[in-house]
Image (cartoon, helix red, strand yellow):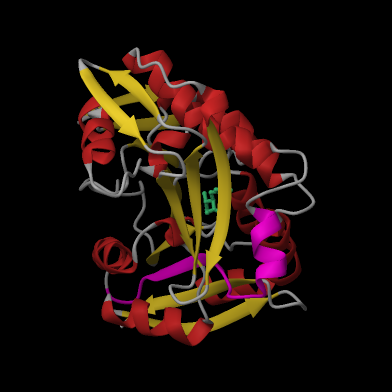
Amino acid sequence: MKISVHGRVTLYDYEPTADDVAGEVLRGLAAPDKTLPCKLFYDARGSELFEQICALDEYYPTRTELGILQEYGRQIAALIGPRVRLAELGSGSSTKTRLLLDRLADPAAYVPIDISRVQLLEAATALAADYPDLPVLAVCADYTQPFELPEPPTPAARTVAFFPGSTIGNLEPPDAVRFLRRVAKWCGRGGGLLLGVDLKKDRAILEPAYDDSRGVTAAFNLNLLERINRELGADFQLDGFRHRAVYNEDRGRIEMHLDSLRPQTVHLLGHDVHFAEGETIDTEHSYKYDVEEFERLAGRAGFEMVRVWTDPRRLFGVLYLTVA
Ligand code: AVI
């Protein structure tokens, strides 16, 4: 790990190496049920498309969570308490954090954690300029891998992790439990977790959120194939695949697919990948939870539910949990 100082921001750089994209792609496409990992969505183009998704009429999670944080920010800040070390997992542009920081009493430090060094430093620098008394300790790391949280210059009363956006839903439930166990270790006894969770609801709301009328989510899904063409020299024909999103009610998850529209062979790093007509690549799961169901899952990781805030339609939940 390397430490460097950038104006008011201290950067703790775990130098995440570029993932073994080729290996993961080949393994996923060689499986009997073809898959691609959803973390590969977020190259520069994919991140741009995701920002557009967040602004879509059909994609309710982003604006609903923002509304909850705006409406209940004071209560949330009061529960978190003074002198907190606030660690944000996958901090991105840190937009939602400002709603919290504006209301927190004398926070000890803000620790944004993100894998994208450029975006992390940009957001952390802008935030440090707007909160001149707040120590900003940025960590460049893949938060699903081990790393240590930096200590604030003066000791914090407690550590609270902030994980908005319902990104927890993109992990398979056993992986979510493993991940939350690690978060519980960082926060320690008395620490907390403020988390966004997308709630179970009618498929008439869910499916359009993942298959919008303007085709932005379709472009986001197909960009995976474009990325593989670009970075690994594959020859996916984009007009040979179609985006499909379906709510699997039994599993409580949205499943995103790319369906092959015809029999075809794709060439990739010396391998021939055959597709039958109608064969699918499973590209993302987005789990939806009931509050009680999530409480049980978090309980297995050592968290206790303290408080839940939702919107009037109960589309989305913001949960505050503490380490038991
Ligand atoms: C990042 N994540 C929480 C989004 C979701 O809703 O599962 C990713 C996404 N996929 C399609 N639209 C949005």
Q: Is residue 324 left or right of residue 67?
A: left
Number of on-image labels: 0
Provide the residue span drawn in magenta.
189-209
Look at 49% across and 41% down and name the residue there: 258
Q: Position of residue 215 (x, y in %)?
A: 70, 38
In the displayed structure, would residue 198 be above or below residue 134? below
Q: Is residue 249 left or right of residue 158?
A: right
Q: Is residue 41 left or right of residue 207?
A: left
Q: Position of residue 163 (x, y in %)?
A: 47, 58
Look at 58% across and 63% down and name the residue there: 105
Q: Kindly tell me whether residue 291 is visible in this rendering.
A: yes
Q: Nearer the viewer, residue 114 or 133?
A: 114
Q: Nearer the viewer, residue 211 or 262?
A: 262
In the displayed structure, would residue 167 be above or below residue 189? above
In the displayed structure, would residue 241 be above or below residue 295? above
As for residue 192 lying within the magenta part, the answer is yes
Q: Position of residue 231 (x, y in %)?
A: 37, 16
Q: Nearer the viewer, residue 20 or 303?
A: 20
In the displayed structure, would residue 138 be above or below residue 194? above
Q: Name the image quarter holding the C terminus.
A: bottom left
Q: Position of residue 90 (x, y in %)?
A: 45, 45
Q: Is residue 323 left or right of residue 82?
A: left
Would you identify the image quadrant in which residue 181 lies? bottom left
Look at 76% across and 77% down and name the residue there: 313
Q: Kindly tell me whether residue 6 is visible in this rendering.
A: no
Q: Name the image quarter holding the N terminus.
A: top left
Look at 72% across and 47% down and name the residue there: 212
